[in-house]
Image: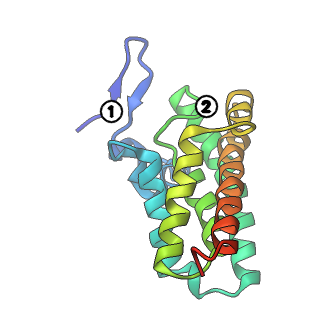
Amino acid sequence: MGSKTDVDGKIIYPSLAWVYAKPWRVIAFSLGTGVLRPGPGTWGTVFGWLVWALLLTHLSDLAVGAVLVVSYIVGCWACQRTGQDLGVSDHGGMNWDEAVAFWFVLWLSPDTWLAQTAAFLLFRFFDIVKPPPIRYFDQRFDNGFGVMWDDIVAAAYALLGMAVLVRLGVLT
């Protein structure tokens, strides 16, 4: 199935073939999960959770920190290039930002199924609702940095919520 375009020829729903045509698109669309509907941001977070469970959870804190920094920088580049290709600076299918931000949340959250589920729900809530200043950053930064940054701020909100839940004894 091919990409769907609007009347101006801009791609609305990229195809998997379009994503896999360039390496930066594969990254920005988290190996293609960004083409899944509905909720490509949620699919990106699920992708991030899977990568965390299979690979990142086994790394040292120093290695996870390095992966986060490198993934953020690579994400800024990949989302910038992909946004240029699409003609839309923050296309909904670009979901690498959700994956990287959720790794940050998981890294600093308790390592239990209940805590990770709570982290997932909190992160998705703040990423979707975009309370201040998330919405401010989302509306004002149109490049790859902006795509990545508003999700890091949503992750910070989720971590604050996690800290409250841990402090109240709801999560351990």
Q: Residue furthest front?
A: 168
Which disc, if any, is residue 89? 2
SS label for mark 1: loop
Q: Pick the quarter of the image with the N terminus.
A: top left
Q: Along the line of sight, which residue is nearer the eye, 145 or 11?
A: 145
Q: Position of residue 166 (x, y in %)?
A: 65, 74
Q: Pick the quarter of the image with the C terminus.
A: bottom right
Q: Which residue is mark 1?
A: 3
Q: Position of residue 121 (x, y in %)?
A: 49, 57
The residues bearing labels 1 and 2 have C-alpha atoms spaced at a distance of 18 Å
Residue drawn at 68 percent across, 41 percent down: 144
Q: Are marks 1 and 2 in contact (CB under 8 Å)?
A: no
- Looking at numbered disc 2 in the image, what kind of residue is underneath it? Ser
Residue drawn at 75 percent across, 73 percent down: 66
Residue 152 left/right relative to 95: right
- Looking at numbered disc 1 in the image, what kind of residue is underneath it? Ser
On screen, residue 77 above or below 68: above
Q: Residues within 10 Å of mark 2 (few under 14, many from 20)?
A: many
